Amino acid sequence: MKPRANPTFFVFGVLGGLLFLDLVLPVASLFLGANWAGWLEALRQPAALQALMISIEASAISMAIMTLLGIPLGYLLARAHLPLKRLWICLVFLPMVMPDLAAGILLLKTFGPYGIIGQPLDAKNIALTNNLAGIVLAQLFVGAPFVIVSALSSFASVDPKLELAAATLGDSRWHIFRRISLPLALPGIAAGLTLAWIRAMGEFGSTLIVAYNPHSLPVYMWVKFESDGIAGALPAAFCLVMLATTAVAMSMLFSRIARFAGVDTPFGKAAMAERY
């Protein structure tokens, strides 16, 4: 018997399809009449290569800091009994929804030459704006929440019974974190790290205010747009879209690994349960 068509699915398909088209069409338009040879040649120009290398260097530094500091913070928010924990979690989410330009103003007020942190450092000839440090600060502000939230969610999904079993056998909290909690949470954390990296690479608004020079790749794209219009900005946009596509694909892969971590990874739940 042939299944009857569901009118609800049809209506929802039309409504959702309109929004899906709005999301996909601008990206698809990038590849319509694409000038691959011209774009690649433009990306080989010294200014473009310098902007790309600056973005890569800054994002590598910010990723190292986010990993070193964000994972422990996510673990604390997931496992520690902290006062006002919901408030701390809300504060972590805040940079994710804050407008970029507002974030840049706040960063400049804090780390700029007249800021509460920047002013005493500026008196010692240490500048945190209009240099690589400024780009890293902007990237940290917008990217770190992705790491913290993914770590929080991943650690919270680890079965506490496994940690409790290890604790009853005399394992220290550090040993439990290193041998049980972190391996089980790692695929989910990796997905968050990937999204944080591409968010940091593509940060524009706050970087424009805190560190216009040296140009990161998004700022360089804006400069080219102002001087040469859309045609001049397209090569940098193409590069950023390709990086974003790769990051999303990797994040989805890590999320899939996390979903099946209890089955097909050496540190899966089944392996941990057998060990303890």
Image (cartoon, rainbow, N blue to C red):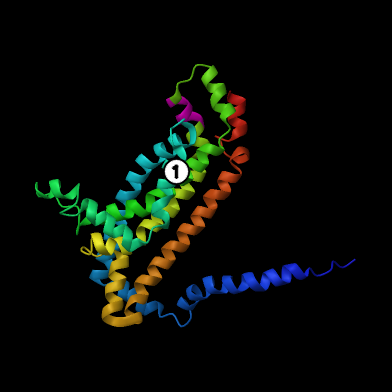
Magenta residue check for 266: no
- As drawn, is 115 to the left or to the right of 265? left
Badge 1 is on which residue?
89
Q: Position of residue 49 (x, y in %)?
A: 27, 66
- As drawn, is 75 to the left or to the right of 211? right
The foreground one among 135 and 55 is 135
Magenta-colored span: 174-180
Magenta residue check for 178: yes
Q: Residue at x 32, y 81 (%)?
A: 229
The foreground one among 5 and 2 is 5
Q: Residue at x 58, y 36 (%)?
A: 268
User: Amino acid under label 1?
Assistant: Ile
Q: Residue at x 37, y 76 (%)?
A: 234
Give neighbour class at mark 1: few <14, some 14-19, many 20+ (Cα, 10 Å): some
Q: Is residue 25 above or below residue 208?
A: below
Q: Position of residue 30 (x, y in %)?
A: 45, 76
Q: Position of residue 10 (x, y in %)?
A: 72, 71
Identity of the residue furthest to the right in this view: 1
Please tell me in which quadrant of the rendered image residue 58 appears. Answer: bottom left
- As drawn, is 163 to the left or to the right of 132? right
Q: Residue at x 71, y 72 (%)?
A: 11
The main secondary structure of the magenta stretch is: helix
Q: Secondary structure at mark 1?
A: helix
Is residue 240 shown to the viewer in this render?
Answer: yes
